[in-house]
């Protein structure tokens, strides 16, 4: 044992600056028994890849959150996220087409139009809450459209998703139980409507038709897919836009370089993903007794993969791994996970972020942070709740 005492189960740790602690973990105790939480913390890039690649040894079926009664787990909802092969592959196959690269590419003109609309509403010369007014609308509207839901409902969607993800933070309005119930009622009505009047090219109608053809799902699974996409794609992408903007504004030389070379936007978005870590970790449970980097892991013990630590592993990212560099190449960050459960929405999130930053870039050169940033009290997605920014 290393003797390292770190509050790895505490939301305050993640919304502060966890990176010095991550460095100590990587160096002194890469497979670290976190006694207070009763789980293993995995901090090196190689090990995070290894754990993500072996669902036979490291299972998702007992949940992927840090063990805490306040966190969502398999007892609350039946998500594909909480399944292992072969069921996981069958479920993933059912929605694979929605995220096929050609389908995502086809969304570009519409997402560009939405991003431009958000940017055009930015008032000149006045401070605004960037997180609320600029980063929040696009991801929720895009998911609403993807799910075939009336985009006019996006604010309700957003408040439900916030209440579900922000349960640990009293600043976030609404409580999870009520939000879950409201969301459930909402989607049951949508499912009922699509059962009576199927629509062409519609997410829910497609799943119901697959079920008719014998796919191994019931109506509750259809609801769970909607729930998963809403919560998986909303906060994370919003965090990427808000945290990425914060990174650019606090690294003026990087912003200046990007302004001179806007063709580097793809790389810049990858670096925002690596450096900002919109989703901090995912967990697994050991399926049997095994050994990882010399540590004996017992069947049933949880392992938490700290993506922020892996993303700054100098063995992979070199001696400047801690630096934010918009031209970093290669950049094999693990912010979307890896292997069996690798993020299905990665292409969509990358597209949304790129288009948003392309629209924002001319304004960012004349923008400045205008007060303290408030982060959400959460372990997995301690994103930015409020960020005052002035655009000159
Ligand atoms: C910056 C934005 C995003 C980040 C950082 C992110 C991160 C992640 C991570 C780390 C996983 C891996 C879970 C695991 O290994 O257990 C994941 C899975 C997933 N993500 Fe994302 N995500 C983002 C955006 C999105 C979007 C926009 C969508 C869809 C609308 C989405 C849908 C999903 C789904 C469906 C899964 C589950 C995959 C599975 O269980 O096989 N994500 N995401």
Image (cartoon, rainbow, N blue to C red):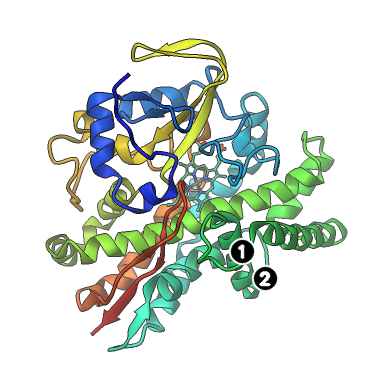
Residue at the spot 76% in from the left edge and 42% down from the top edge? 210
What is the quadrant of residue 211 in the picture? top right
Q: Which secondary structure lies at badge 1?
A: helix
> What label sits on residue 97 in the rendered view?
none
Report x, y in % for residue 279: 43, 47
Report x, y in % for residue 314: 19, 33
Number of numbered tags placed on the structure image: 2
Mark 1 highlights which residue?
144
184 relative to 249 in the view: left or right:
right
Q: Quadrant of residue 84?
A: top right
Say if disc 2 is inside 8 Å of ligand 1: no
Above or below, comparing residue 340 to residue 252 in the picture: above
Q: Residue 339, image x and y in percent? A: 46, 29
Task: Point out residue 217 in the picture as x, y percentages from the top left corner.
Answer: 77, 38
Q: CA distance from mark 2 to mark 1?
A: 7 Å
Q: Nearer the viewer, residue 205 or 7?
A: 7
**Circles 2 and 1 in contact, beta carbons < 8 Å:** yes
Q: Which residue is mark 2?
A: 150
Q: Secondary structure at mark 2?
A: loop
């Amino acid at each position: 044992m290393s003797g390292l005492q770190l509050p790895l189960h505490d939301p305050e740790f993640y919304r502060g600056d966890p990176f010095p602690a991550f460095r100590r973990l990587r160096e002194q105790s890469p497979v670290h028994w976190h006694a207070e939480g009763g789980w293993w913390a995995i901090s090196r890039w190689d090990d995070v890849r290894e754990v993500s690649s072996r669902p036979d040894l490291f299972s998702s079926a007992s949940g992927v959150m840090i063990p805490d009664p306040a966190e969502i787990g398999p007892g609350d909802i039946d998500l594909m996220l909480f399944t292992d092969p072969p069921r996981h592959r069958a479920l993933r196959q059912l929605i694979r087409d929605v995220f096929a690269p050609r389908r995502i590419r086809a969304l570009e003109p519409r997402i560009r139009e939405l991003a431009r609309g958000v940017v055009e509403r930015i008032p000149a010369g006045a401070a605004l809450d960037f997180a609320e007014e600029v980063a929040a609308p696009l991801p929720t509207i895009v998911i609403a459209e993807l799910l075939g839901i009336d985009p006019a409902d996006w604010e309700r969607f957003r408040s439900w998703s916030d209440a579900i993800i922000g349960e640990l933070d009293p600043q976030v309005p609404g409580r999870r139980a009520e939000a879950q119930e409201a969301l459930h009622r909402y989607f049951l009505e949508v499912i009922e409507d699509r059962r009576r009047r199927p629509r062409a090219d519609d997410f829910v109608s497609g799943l119901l038709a697959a079920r008719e053809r014998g796919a191994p799902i019931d109506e509750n699974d259809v609801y769970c897919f909607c729930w998963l996409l809403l919560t998986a794609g909303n906060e994370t992408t919003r965090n990427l836009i808000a945290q990425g903007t914060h990174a650019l504004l606090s690294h003026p030389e990087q912003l200046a370089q990007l302004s001179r070379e806007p063709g580097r936007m793809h790389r810049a978005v990858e670096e925002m993903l690596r450096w900002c870590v919109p989703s901090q970790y995912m967990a697994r449970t050991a399926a049997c007794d095994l050994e990882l980097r010399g540590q004996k892991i017992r069947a049933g013990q949880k392992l938490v993969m700290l993506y922020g630590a892996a993303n700054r592993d100098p063995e992979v990212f070199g001696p400047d791994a801690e630096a934010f560099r918009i031209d970093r190449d290669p950049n094999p960050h693990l912010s979307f996970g890896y292997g069996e459960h690798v993020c299905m929405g990665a292409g969509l999130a990358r597209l949304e972020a790129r288009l948003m930053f392309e629209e924002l870039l001319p304004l960012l050169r004349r923008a400045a942070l205008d007060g303290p940033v408030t982060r959400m009290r959460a372990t997995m997605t301690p994103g930015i709740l409020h960020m005052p920014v002035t655009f000159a």
